[in-house]
Structure formats: structure tokens, C-alpha cells
Amino acid sequence: AQIALTLHKLTGLCYVSDELLEDSAIALEAELVRKFGEAIAFVEDDDYLNGTGANMALGVLNSANPALITVTAISGQGANTIIAENIRDMWTQLYPRGHGRSVWLANIETFPQLFSMEMAVGTGGVPVWLPAGGMSGAPFQTLMGKELIFTEKCQALGTAGDIALVDFSQYAIGQRGGGGVTTAMSIHLRFDYDETAFRFVLRYDGQPTWTSALTPKRGSNDLGPTIVLNSTRT
């Protein structure tokens, strides 16, 4: 199978009066480059996760990802919840070679759920994510030994994609030669307004490299590099 990377554009444009450029107490041009670079990087990252593939990257968490695996929630676990069994089941469907390269991504709204997770032991439960020192210790930054990254680019709690397990080595990214944001300025576009135009352009694309989930030689569960939890939790 083949995938195609077609570079799309992310652009930013602003106008700055020449008085502001001349009188600013800070290096305004450098500040614009920094701020627009951060904004474009935010959108770029979000597209690699959630992009629809229409004039943008196809994100790993988008339902159009042909290899996306959605794990069924546990019956009776409750709405807007994440429990230890969900984490277990998500790990079970990550393809084994991805165990060493994967990371967890989660919306910060999931933190209370992770903080409260426990495994049933007899008639009680044992915390599975709370540090040994309880709330006095720094919260864990791993699940199943893999890094956990909180990001607002994940979906809200209770939505598929609120927590995800991803092996990004199985995702292809393409950028123009040299990569990065191209910056240009012009005094001509708004010459009659005594303004300078600043333009910022990133050409990029991203696609999952798998065209379907993997059916293992032995076993009944599909395996893949991107795992999310079903939004149907009751």
C-alpha cells in the first residue's frame, strides 16, 4: 500500500505601523516571529492529532484514520469516567512492537479519573496511579511505564480521544525542504497606510502509515499503533 503526502499551507499575516516598529522598546520583529511560530506550531500539532485530511494533515485520533482502534468501555463504569480496566484494555490492543515507542496523551480533564483509579482487591481497592507518598508526592508522569503527556489537543473527558495511546513512529510527516516556518515582510502591500506586512507560512502534511488495523496470527483482538477509548461509557 502507498500513502501520499501533499503539502498544505498554514499561514499567518499581520500589519504593523511603522511608528510601532520605530518606537517599540522591544525587538518587535523577533517577537512577532516567536509568537506566530508558537501559534502555527500549535495548529500543526493539533492537525497531527485531530486533522480531517481535507486541506490539512490526517490526524492519528481522527475517525478517518484507517488503523485507529477504539476500545470498548466496561459495562457499568459510568459516564465521563476512566478506570484501570480501560488502561489495561487499551494496552492490550497496542501492537507489541509499539510497546517500547508509544506515549500516552490525555486531556487534563482526565486527571481526576487517573488520580482515582484503583484495582479491585477483595471487597476493597488499591490505588494504581497515586504515588507512594499520596498527595504529598509529585503525580506520576507514566502509565504502564510509558510517558503520559497532558494536552488540551486531546478531546474533552467522556469523548473518544480524551485519552490515547500512540506510537508516533508509525506516522509520516512531510514538510518543505528545510522545514519550519518561512517568514517574509513587505513595505509595499500597505505602503499608503505606512504599515509593514509580516507573513508566516508553514507547508506540511501528515498521514498514518497503516492502512488498516493488524489482525494477529493468533488472537482475536485487532492490534494497531493508535488506541482510544470509546465515548459510550455508562
Image: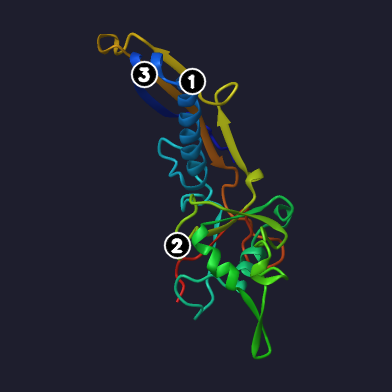
Q: Mark 3 points at which residue?
A: 20
**Residue at image coords 58%, 21%:** 177
**18, 47: nearer the viewer:** 18
Q: Characterize the local packing of mark 1: few (<14), some (14-19) or many (20 or more) Cα atoms within 10 angstroms.
A: few
Q: Do the residues labelled 1 and 3 touch (CB within 8 Å)?
A: no
**131, 199: nearer the viewer:** 131
Q: Is residue 44 left or right of residue 139?
A: left
Q: Characterize the local packing of mark 3: few (<14), some (14-19) or many (20 or more) Cα atoms within 10 angstroms.
A: few
Measuring from the top left, give residue 190's x and y in whole percent: 29, 13
Q: What residue type is labelled 2?
A: Thr
Count numbered badges in the picture: 3
**Residue at image coords 62%, 69%:** 89
Q: Mark 2 points at which residue?
A: 159
Rendered image quadrant of residue 169 = top right
**Residue at image coords 39%, 16%:** 23
Which of disc 2 and disc 1 is earlier in sequence? 1
Can residue 13 be spotted in the picture? yes
Q: Mark 1 points at which residue?
A: 27
Can residue 220 be spotted in the picture? no
Which of disc 3 and disc 2 is earlier in sequence? 3
